[in-house]
Image (tube, grey):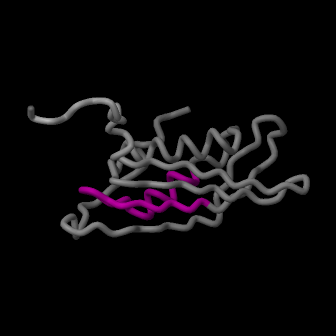
């Protein structure tokens, strides 16, 4: 699979001094089931708190469209989208929710999350950070 991050373009965050949330809904996402080759349809909801850059929407649309012929399970494609967006945007926070349409009587929702503060690591509660 080619490096899809090259498709994504960004622009400078117009208000980096303020924390705010951006949500994009993409109701026409398609990929292929790797077992049957049949198309899977989903609405992709991306919500993020930008740092220095924001995603340019036409490039984001083309990025999502690039999955049209890729055979990937729901969980894999949702996590790949999150990983690519985090790599390019370096946001404070980002979630991707993939709401897949009903197939065989079952609908599926996969949600993955990135939080830059969670990535800093956990401190051991027993550690002594006092200056004494």
Q: Residue at x 56, y 32 (%)?
A: 1
Where's residue 23, x and y in %?
47, 68
Quadrant position of residue 100? bottom right
Q: Is residue 62 left or right of residue 92?
A: right
Q: In the rendered view, would you say 34 is above or below 112?
A: above
Where's residue 87, x and y in %?
38, 42
Where's residue 94, x and y in %?
44, 54
Q: Number of marks in the image?
A: 0
Q: Nearer the viewer, residue 68 or 16?
A: 16
Q: Residue at x 59, y 56 (%)?
A: 97
Let me know if residue 79 is in the magenta part: no
Q: Residue at x 49, y 46 (%)?
A: 82
Let me know if residue 61 is in the magenta part: yes
Q: Is residue 92 left or right of residue 103?
A: left
Q: Which stretch appears magenta? A: 44-65
Q: Nearer the viewer, residue 71 or 117?
A: 117
Q: In the rendered view, would you say 51 is above or below 71?
A: below
In the rendered image, the quadrant that contains the C terminus is top left
Q: In the rendered view, would you say 129 is above or below 12?
A: above
Q: Residue at x 56, y 42 (%)?
A: 79
Quadrant position of residue 71? top right
Check the image and name the residue furthest to the right: 104
Check the image and name the residue furthest to the front: 132
Q: Nearer the viewer, residue 87 or 58?
A: 87
């Amino acid at each position: 699979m080619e490096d899809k991050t090259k498709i994504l373009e960004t622009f400078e965050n117009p208000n980096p001094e303020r924390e705010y949330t951006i949500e994009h809904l993409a109701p026409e996402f398609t990929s292929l089931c790797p077992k049957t080759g049949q198309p899977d349809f989903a609405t992709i909801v991306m919500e993020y708190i930008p740092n220095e850059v924001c995603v340019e929407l036409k490039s984001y649309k083309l990025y999502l469209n690039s999955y049209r012929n890729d055979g990937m399970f729901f969980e894999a494609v949702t996590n790949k989208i999150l990983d690519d967006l985090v790599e390019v945007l370096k946001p404070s926070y980002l979630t991707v929710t993939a709401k897949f349409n009903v197939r065989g009587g079952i609908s599926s929702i996969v949600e993955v999350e990135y939080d830059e503060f969670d990535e800093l690591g956990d401190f051991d509660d027993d550690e002594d950070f006092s200056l004494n």
